[in-house]
Image: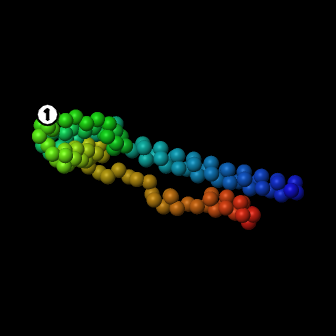
Amino acid sequence: MHPRTVESQSDLLEAVRARIRAQLEDAQAKATALAGEDLPDRGIGESDDGIVQTTVDRQGLLVDAQFGPQIVDLTPEELRENMLSALAAARRDLTGGVTPRRPDPSMLADTSTIDALDDIINGRL
């Protein structure tokens, strides 16, 4: 392989690495900004009949569930409905009833890095 070709491929790979680093830093900055929203550390919710109480973390994931003694009288479907109701209430408590912002789906459409790698692999650069 010609030394000049190796050097130019090395330069191209370094350019791709720099592009990937920049995209990762940008994604990290956006994730940090989203995580910094004014959300409490947890949300607590209760089913309509008070049999189930749930706690969710800052991301809305279940971290605790407590059940009243009346749980023994519930059918599996009633238990499911109570659990989902309490979970929804905890998430509303977490967000103050507002749906949290999610990352823009268009961010997932950036193919520039994979396109550059494809060009290198297929010898178009």
Label 1: element kind:
helix
Q: Position of residue 105 (x, y in %)?
A: 45, 59
Residue 119 as seen in the image, left or right of residue 46: right
Q: Residue at the spot x=67%, y=50% of the render?
A: 18
Q: Residue at the spot x=64%, y=62% of the render?
A: 115
**Observer-nearest residue: 100 or 5?**
5
Is residue 98 visible in the rendered image? The answer is yes
User: Quick one: which residue is furthest to the right in this view?
Assistant: 2
Residue 115 as seen in the image, left or right of residue 66: right
Q: Residue at the spot x=32%, y=36% of the render?
A: 63
Residue 69 as seen in the image, left or right of residue 26: left
**How many numbered discs, if any?**
1
Q: Quadrant of residue 42?
A: top left
Mark 1 crowdedness (10 Å alpha carbons): few <14, some 14-19, many ≥20: few
Q: Is residue 14 depicted above or below 118 in this figure?
A: above
**Observer-nearest residue: 36 or 114?**
114
Q: Position of residue 6 (x, y in %)?
A: 82, 54
User: Quick one: which residue is furthest to the bottom in this view?
Assistant: 124
Work out which quarter of the rendered image holds the C terminus and state it: bottom right
Question: What's the amino acid at mark 1?
Answer: Pro
Q: Quadrant of residue 112?
A: bottom right
Is residue 93 visible in the rendered image? The answer is no
Q: Is residue 82 depicted above or below 124 in this figure?
A: above
Q: Position of residue 80 (x, y in %)?
A: 22, 47
**Observer-nearest residue: 64 or 75?**
75
Q: Is residue 70 depicted above or below 124 in this figure?
A: above
Residue 106 as seen in the image, left or right of residue 118: left
Q: Residue at the spot x=22%, y=34% of the render?
A: 66
Q: Which residue is mark 1?
A: 69
Q: Position of residue 64 (x, y in %)?
A: 29, 35
Work out which quarter of the rendered image holds the N terminus and state it: bottom right
